[in-house]
Amino acid sequence: MREQFLLNLRILTEKYLATERKIERLKSSSVQTLFGNSLKEASEREESAKQESVEPMNENNDNSVTENIELDSATKEELEQLRLLLEQSEAVVAKQKIHISEQESRIQKLNENILSLSNRLAHLSDAEVIHSVPYRSLRRRNDELLAQIDKLEAYNQRYHREKTALIHERTDFQQKLRSETDAKVNELQSKLNKCETDLARIRSARDELISSLNLKRATESERNKGMDHLKELVDIGNARIKTLEAEINRLKDNSSDSQTNTDPSNIDNATIEELKTLVQKLQRQNNSLVSELPGLEAAFNKAHKQANFKITDLLEREAKSTKLVAEKAKADEKYFSAMRAKDALNYEFQKVKAQLAKSAEWIQQLREAEKKHTLKISSLEAKIEDYNVKQASAEKERSALLHKLSDAERRLDSSRSLTEKLNSDIRNRDRSIRQEIENRRSIELENEKLKKQVEIKNLTTSNGSKSSLDLESQLEELRSIAICAVCTKNWKDTAIKVCGHVMCNDCATSRLTSRLRKCPLCNKQFSQSDLLPIHL
């Protein structure tokens, strides 16, 4: 608030200095030269009026002076009134200055009171602090907080014990579960290995039995074929024996006939007995031949059939051999593919074995890491215990700090109440000072108005005289400087960049639209871009 007062005071001083500068500017030499003649004549008229009022019976005065006195009596009364108003306003301003000095002294006293109260607040006694209401409320609140802290510490210790018990139970359960799972995994792995060995043994026994069965079947079929072939050969041999026996009989007959010397060519010379014997011989030969023919035919047929069978058997053997060669090639290919698959399986087995070894190594590493973590957890629990002890000591320190804080808050509350009271007083002072400032501003405005009225009266008192004519001529010259020389209606507000002459905007634009693009004063050409707006 003090800064606000100083700011308002600074603003008032600046405004006062501005008004003084305006008054000095009105009293400057340039203004005096402009309005000097009128002011001199007004002062001479006032002096002559005073002389006429002091010596009314002077006969040597001119008639022109008496006429001026009669003419300026009304204006002189107005000037007297304005002077009175000016004196009143100056008196009011002086009074306002006195009020401002009083307000500054009061502000200084208030600042001194604030300093004394702040010193008192900074150096309060213990008795005042203890018997204050905020201290008692904070003390009760502090006791409640301490009771809550003790309760929370008991809860914390109980929860910590429960947590440690749960952690131990969890570690025991994890170790038990891990041991059980490891035992089950090892048991299942051993069973799996045993099953794999049994499966390989069963498969090898199956393959051996299948190969021996196929071999026995092949030998049995070959033996059956040999027996059939042997039976056929026996039948052929029997038939051949029969034919040979018949041939032997026939040959025996022929030998017996040869002994009798019967020649079939000598039939004409033969006797009846010889012919009968010859006929019998021929019948016997015929019968023997007839009896030999079925056996020969059967033997031929069997031999032909056997030859055909051998040919077909040979063809079948060749086809079977080619088929077996193809099957052997397929079997070799299957064997090689099986060997490749076996190699791939062996590679996969080695890979899986390596992965299992790695996983076992990782499991071992994880176990070691778990042991390390358990050690770290135990060390951290010990640290937590230390931290709990430190926390207890910190709580004690905090309670002491809370006591100090309660004292500081109590002092702060009392200082706040004092500052609020002082702020209310300062706001009341501020309102009164603002009211005084507003009054002073209104008085200053009235003062300025009265000064302007005095100046206008001083100017109007010189009407009809020679100085007024000079003033009018000067004003006319000034007006001719500010009025456009082309149209003599508008103010000069546009300059030509080419030559520097000034005219109004209407004349410049009208000359551009009518294509008269030359300056009317120097005949220099210009365009739209050469026009520059100005402000007089």
Image (tube, helix red, strand yellow):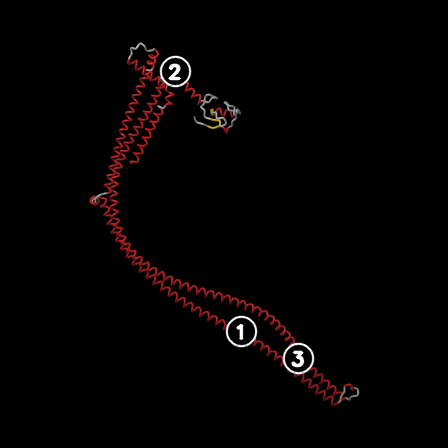
Counting residues from the N terminus, which is met first, the one under dot 2 or under dot 3?
3
Q: Is residue 306 left or right of residue 51?
A: right
Name the front one of labels 1 and 3: 1
Amino acid carrying label 2: it is Lys
Amino acid carrying label 1: it is Ser
Could you say where residue 102 lies in the image, as x and y percent from the top left? Answer: 25, 31
Counting residues from the N terminus, which is met first, the one under dot 1 or under dot 3?
1
- Find out whether the residues at labels 1 and 2 contact each other: C-beta distance under 8 Å: no
Name the front one of labels 2 and 3: 2
Q: Quadrant of the C terminus?
A: top left
Amino acid carrying label 3: it is Ala
Label 3: element kind: helix
Based on the displayed image, in which of its 4 quarters is residue 325 positioned? bottom right
Q: CA distance from mark 1 to mark 2?
A: 160 Å
Label 1: element kind: helix
Name the residue that disc number 2 marks: 466
Of residues 391 and 257, the one drawn nearer to the viewer in this rendering:
391
* Residue at horizontal 51 percent and vertical 65 percent from the top: 344
Of residues 1 and 68, the one drawn nearer to the viewer in this rendering:
68
Label disc, if present, on residue 299 of the rendered structure: 3
Name the front one of labels 1 and 2: 2
Q: CA distance from mark 1 to mark 3?
A: 41 Å
Q: Residues within 10 Å of mark 3 (few under 14, many from 20)?
A: some
Could you say where residue 285 lies in the image, as x and y percent from the top left? Answer: 71, 84
